[in-house]
Image (cartoon, rainbow, N blue to C red):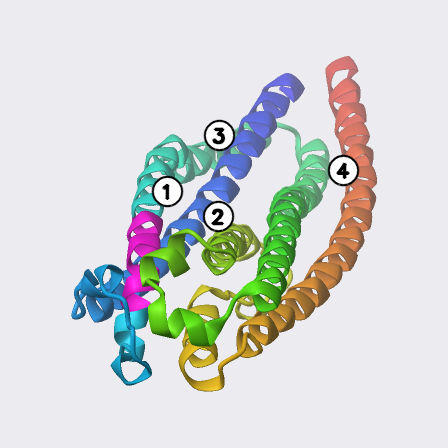
Amino acid sequence: MGRRLEKIEKEMGYCEIKLEKEKRIRKQIEFVTHDLVEIEAMLRRLNQHDDSLLRSTNRELHDRPSKEAFLSAGLRRILEEKRELLLRDHQDLNSKLLHYVGFEKKKKTLEEEKKEALRELPESRSGRLRRINDDFKKIEHVWNELSEDLINFDEGIFFLERDLDYLRSCRNFLISAKGGFDIEMWRKDGYLTDLFRHSNIGRALEMADGADRNVQSAQKELVCVNSYRVRIEALSRVLLPFTEALFEDLFEIGRLDRSIQVIEAALAGNLKQLEQFKAKREVYAEKLEHTEKSRNQLFQRMGIGRRSEMTA
């Protein structure tokens, strides 16, 4: 009988792990879906402006593009690529989800088998095993949550560190552009094609896109953390505000100040959030270590109960 209960407990533990995974994948699907909706809305907004600006010269200041046309020229291609990546991610997550469905029903079946196995034991022994198993069920739930939370924290921290690398590169390209880019001359003789694809400003735009992709990946992980309210909205995405600031710098201010400010503000803010996540991750690691000890103690108690029952 002890071995039967042990087998049931192992299978129930397996189900709990799968159910925890399923819950987090569903959160990620919801998160990616929200991002897709936002990108689709932005593309509909930008698609109202054709890409003729990429073939024009803007030779006179009074011929400057509208802000929406400028954003369309700079962002449409990037957002279309981002949409494709998100659609692929959404599809992959839904395919992954298929491996985790159906375990709720299996868990209920195992719970009935467990009750039946306990009913077949003498009351003095079944009562003790019920108490141990109730404690084990609680500690196993905490252990599963903390284990998955740590995985999400580690993945989120990894992507946030990459985000900061991209932001630093973006700032460096902007500083180089500020020292060697004649805005007045460009407005007279330049091309948006050269600006967005063949200049330090274009490289900065690519770095801003890379930073946002890593923030999105970090948020997709951190949104899954169960026992800590992660304010993912506190993490800065910079692609749109950076491009808007770039328009102001080129056609209103005449120097690359606002663009650099946007990137530096994101750097400072995301670095602060990263340090907070690292500190919270250490707290969770300590909780998991403590839970591991309690879990092992329960394993030992369950083992003693089984041996006593088998030798009685």
The residue that disc 1 covers is 89
Where on the picture, by quarter, is residue 52?
Answer: bottom left
Q: Which of marks 3 and 2 is in front?
A: 2
Task: State which tag comes first along the sequence, 1 or 2.
Answer: 2
Quadrant placement of the N terminus: top right
Q: Which mark is residue 113?
A: 3
Q: Can residue 120 be seen in this view?
A: no
What is the CA distance from the residue labelled 1 to the residue labelled 3? 39 Å
Task: State which tag comes first along the sequence, 3 or 2.
Answer: 2
- Figure check: 258 above or below 51: below
Residue 198 is situated, as x and y percent measured from the top left of the image, at: 42, 51
Q: Which of 169 and 23 is in front in this view?
A: 169
Q: Nearer the viewer, mark 4 or mark 2?
A: 2
Q: Which amino acid does label 2 sit on?
A: Arg
Residue 290 is situated, as x and y percent measured from the top left of the image, at: 83, 45
Task: State which tag comes first along the sequence, 4 or 2.
Answer: 2
Q: Which amino acid does label 4 sit on?
A: Arg
Q: Which of marks 1 and 2 is in front?
A: 1
